[in-house]
Image (cartoon, rainbow, N blue to C red):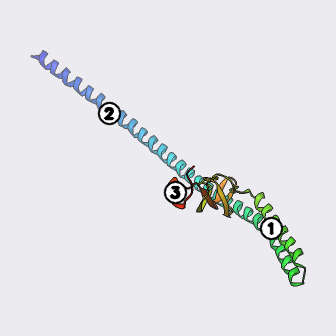
């Protein structure tokens, strides 16, 4: 019986040692988990701070770009106005000369000169005139105001009512045109024309 008691005591002692080890291991694990949580929390704070800094830098960059774009637009507008002021000055001179009694031919030549000067300024900014007269009708470049019947020039622009323009390759105003169209056979019969 003593042996059984001794075995029970040994089992109990062993159990207590295991429990002590288990408690110690759990304490160590808990401590490791606390350290990991603290490290991860610090890492999270650091990442959040970096994120906030990056957002602030991005916002500052956006504001700088908006200011730079606005300044570039101002510079471009100043250049356009400065060049057009030359034309305005020449118009004022032409009107002054008209009031002083300059002959009509000189005045007309002056206006033509101003017109050429204005076109040159606009062309220097990238303006292109759309060639339309006697060209095939293109709905991307032309706005047909009227269609006239013509056997020989079907689909051809026969008159330009208002010139069209592109700026650096982009359409800013289509040409307003009159287009020729070959009459249909039944229209020829109605008007008394012979069929070909």
What kind of element bears circle 3?
helix
Residue that label 1 marks:
115
Badge nearest the viewer, 2 or 3: 3
Residue 28, relative to residue 173: is it above or below?
above
Q: Is residue 75 left or right of residue 41?
A: right
Left or right: residue 52 versus residue 104 is left
The residue shown at (88%, 80%) is 97
Q: How many marks?
A: 3
Residue 56 in percent (x, y) is at: 57, 55
Which residue is rendered at x = 9% and y = 16% of the image? 1
Sequence-first tag of 2 and 3: 2
The mark nearer the N terminus, 1 or 3, is 1
Q: Residues within 10 Å of mark 2 (few under 14, many from 20)?
A: few
- Label 2, label 1: how many angstroms apart (C-alpha)? 94 Å
**Relative to 52, residue 120 above or below:** below
Between 195 and 51, which is closer to the camera in this rendering?
A: 195
**Residue drawn at x 83%, y 77% as measured from the top left:** 92
Check disc 2 and report its element: helix, strand or loop.
Answer: helix
Instruction: Determine which quarter of the picture holds residue 156.
Output: bottom right
Disc 3 designates what residue? Answer: 189
* Front position in the image: 145 or 26: 145
Which tag is nearer the camera, tag 1 or tag 3? Answer: 3
Q: Secondary structure at mark 1?
A: helix
- Choose the circle earlier in sequence order: 2 or 1: 2
Front: mark 2 or 1: 1
Residue at mark 2 to residue at mark 3: CA–CA distance: 107 Å
What label does residue 26 carry, if any? 2
How far apart marks 1 and 3 lie (CA) works out to 48 Å
- Residue that appears at 19% across and 22% down: 11
Q: Position of residue 157 (x, y in %)?
A: 65, 57
């Amino acid at each position: 019986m003593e042996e059984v008691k001794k075995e029970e005591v040994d089992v109990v002692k062993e159990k207590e040692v295991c429990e002590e080890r288990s408690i110690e291991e759990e304490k160590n694990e808990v401590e490791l988990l606390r350290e990991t949580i603290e490290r991860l929390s610090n890492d999270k704070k650091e990442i959040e701070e970096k994120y906030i800094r990056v957002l602030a830098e991005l916002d500052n960059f956006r504001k700088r770009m908006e200011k730079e774009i606005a300044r570039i637009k101002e510079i471009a507008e100043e250049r356009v106005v400065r060049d057009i002021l030359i034309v305005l000055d020449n118009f004022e001179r032409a009107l002054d000369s008209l009031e002083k009694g300059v002959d009509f031919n000189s005045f007309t030549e002056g206006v033509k000169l101003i017109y050429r000067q204005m076109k040159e300024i606009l062309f220097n900014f990238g303006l292109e005139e759309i060639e339309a007269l006697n060209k095939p009708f293109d709905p991307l470049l032309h706005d047909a105001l009227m269609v006239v019947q013509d056997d020989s020039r079907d689909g051809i622009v026969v008159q330009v009512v208002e010139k069209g323009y592109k700026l650096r390759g982009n359409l800013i105003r289509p040409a307003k045109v009159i287009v020729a169209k070959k009459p249909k056979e039944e229209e020829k019969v109605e008007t008394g024309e012979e069929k070909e």
